[in-house]
Image (spheres, rainbow, N blue to C red):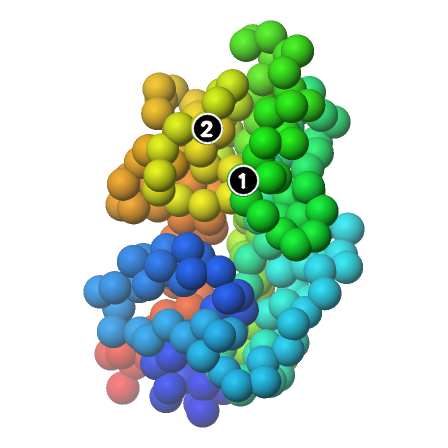
Amino acid sequence: MDRGIAGRKRVLLATRNRGKVRELQALLGDEGIEVLSAADLDGAPEVAETGDTFRENALLKARALAAFGGLLTVADDSGLEVDALAGRPGVRSARYAGEPADDVRNYQRVLVEMAGVPDGERTARFRCALAVVVPSGSEQVFEAACEGTLGRAPRGRRGFGYDPIFHPSGGARTMAELGDDEKNRISHRGRAFVAALPAIRALLGEGEKGDG
């Protein structure tokens, strides 16, 4: 274990997305761990997401920010996969409607492309790959998904991204209509974060308690 990293009790989240920062802060709220974001580090690099998979992009971001910030770094790459669109927008989810990235334009493009698709064929999923990297080089990746269907119009004011048009399986509400705690329990990113928590605790020294 990297003892320097273990003593910091800080995690760097490789994003400037405030929604993602809030989600991780909520999950680590009782852990006594401070969450920093790329926006908190002057000169933090913008990492091009050039990978062909969520896993590749998550590792690209985590490696770059861990090297820059000298902290245990968590990075995710997440997106929406729509079966009727052959898996699009996929890894291009954040910029599906082009530059600059815009959540509303992105989900509106999906709704237009799905306009003629019947209700029974509107299946989709959110997928997340979450990388945990320390500057010494240790790497782990955790993956999770949330199955659901796409609505025909946006609903809800919470969340971000495609949340307003995504209905998690078994629920009538969109992801954007759920409270933070409820969303974190079922979301792709929440599940990936929960799966990663034991590794984060161990790397920060939580796993050393009682070892003498």
Instruction: Give above or below for 63 relative to 108.
Output: below
Nearer the observer, 135 or 81: 81
Mark-to-mark CA distance, 2 and 1: 9 Å
How many C-alpha atoms fall within 10 Å of the one at disc 2: few (<14), some, or many (≥20)? some
Amino acid marked by disc 2: Pro
User: Can residue 208 be seen?
Assistant: yes
Numbered disc 1: secondary structure? helix
**Image x and y of residue 121, in percent:** 61, 12
Counting the numbered discs, the total is 2
Name the residue that disc number 1 marks.
104
How many C-alpha atoms fall within 10 Å of the one at disc 1: few (<14), some, or many (≥20)? some
Instruction: Find out whether the residues at labels 2 and 1 contact each other: C-beta distance under 8 Å.
Output: yes
**Image x and y of residue 30, in percent:** 22, 65
Numbered circle sitting on residue 154: 2
User: Can residue 91 be seen?
Assistant: no
Q: Quadrant of the C terminus?
A: bottom left
Q: Residue at x 56, y 72 (%)?
A: 133
Nearer the observer, 173 or 135: 173
Numbered circle sitting on residue 185: none
**Image x and y of residue 11, in percent:** 42, 75
Q: Residue at x 57, y 34 (%)?
A: 107
Amino acid marked by disc 1: Val
Please report whichever mark, 2 or 1, sits nearer to the chain's N-terminal start: 1
User: Residue 82 is drawn in which quadrant?
Assistant: top right
Q: Residue at x 51, y 74 (%)?
A: 38
Relative horizontal placement of residue 72, taking residue 34 as reference (left or right): right
User: Residue 113 is drawn in which quadrant?
Assistant: top right
Instruction: Give above or below for 88 relative to 134.
Output: above
